Amino acid sequence: MLRGGRAAMLSLEMSEPAESTVPRVLLVEDEESISGPFAQALTRYGFEPLVARTGGEALRIEREEHPDVVLLDLALPDLDGLEVCRALRSSSRVPIIMLTARGTVTDRIVGLELGADDYVVKPFDPGEVASRIRAVLRRASSEPEPKARISLGDLRLDCGARRVWQGEDELSLTRKEFDLLARLAGEPGRVVTRETLMSDVWDENWFGSTKTLDVHIASLRRKLGDDPADPRYIETVRGVGFRLAPG
């Protein structure tokens, strides 16, 4: 039996709380009737919510607090949500899920091309959003270890640093564009099916349309200067998937 100071010290050590591992979610929403209840729902689902009601406030909180994921409404009183997405992507790789009442294909395409990881159209179910948050966090935590380097012709990828060069020029790719290129470059000359790309890059629990894949492939081709009618890099295998030319 432990006695005196030794027992008290052990009791104190055992009672100290463990370091928190609760994911922090920055909710960017100007309507308090939505942000208040939704922040409470995020807490119930096991997240720590941070709330911003303007684009400027969102950029400041992201810079100071470093949240694990951002839920970004597109309709904000000061900055357009797409501007906020662009600003975040210029300095951070934090996963971004867009919240939009617009629901137009153009808004979703532009947001995804700017680097958003997912989107949800209002009205939405908090449980579905919680599942999407967990999915993007899983994908972010399973990025390549900082060791894989791939060279194919004039393309060079550093998967650890998440950087890619075409000749002497470094390309500016979004998270998903880089993940797609790295996945295809991992098996050069072989067809990677659409289903495999969606599972590996977006997660097996992806809720959205597979058209998202086509949007990102088209954007990646533009940045590579690749002509889809006569591709030098990314070849389409109709009805199956895509193939990266081996060199």
Image (cartoon, helix red, strand yellow):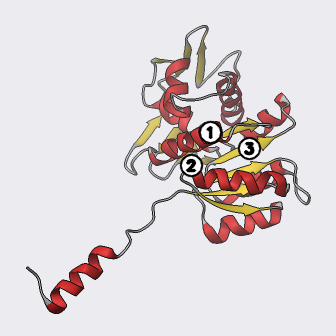
Quadrant housing residue 148:
top left
User: Residue 45, labelled with which disc?
Assistant: 2
| Residue 189 sits above or below residue 54 on the image | above
Q: Earlier in the sequence, mark 2 or mark 1?
A: 2
Give the amino acid type for the residue marked by disc 1 in the picture: Gly
User: Residue 127, labelled with which disc?
Assistant: 1
| Residue at the spot of label 3 | 98
What residue is rendered at 83% in x and 53% in y? Answer: 33
What residue is rendered at 60% in x and 43% in y? Answer: 130
Q: 10 Å neighbourhood of mark 2: few (<14), some, or many (≥20)?
A: some
Mark 3 or 2, closer to the camera = 2
Q: Secondary structure at mark 2?
A: loop
Examine the rendering and report whether any part of residue 44 can be seen. Answer: yes
Q: Which part of the image, by quadrant, shows the N terminus?
A: bottom left
Q: 10 Å neighbourhood of mark 1: few (<14), some, or many (≥20)?
A: few
Q: Are marks 2 and 1 in contact (CB under 8 Å)?
A: yes
Q: Earlier in the sequence, mark 3 or mark 1?
A: 3
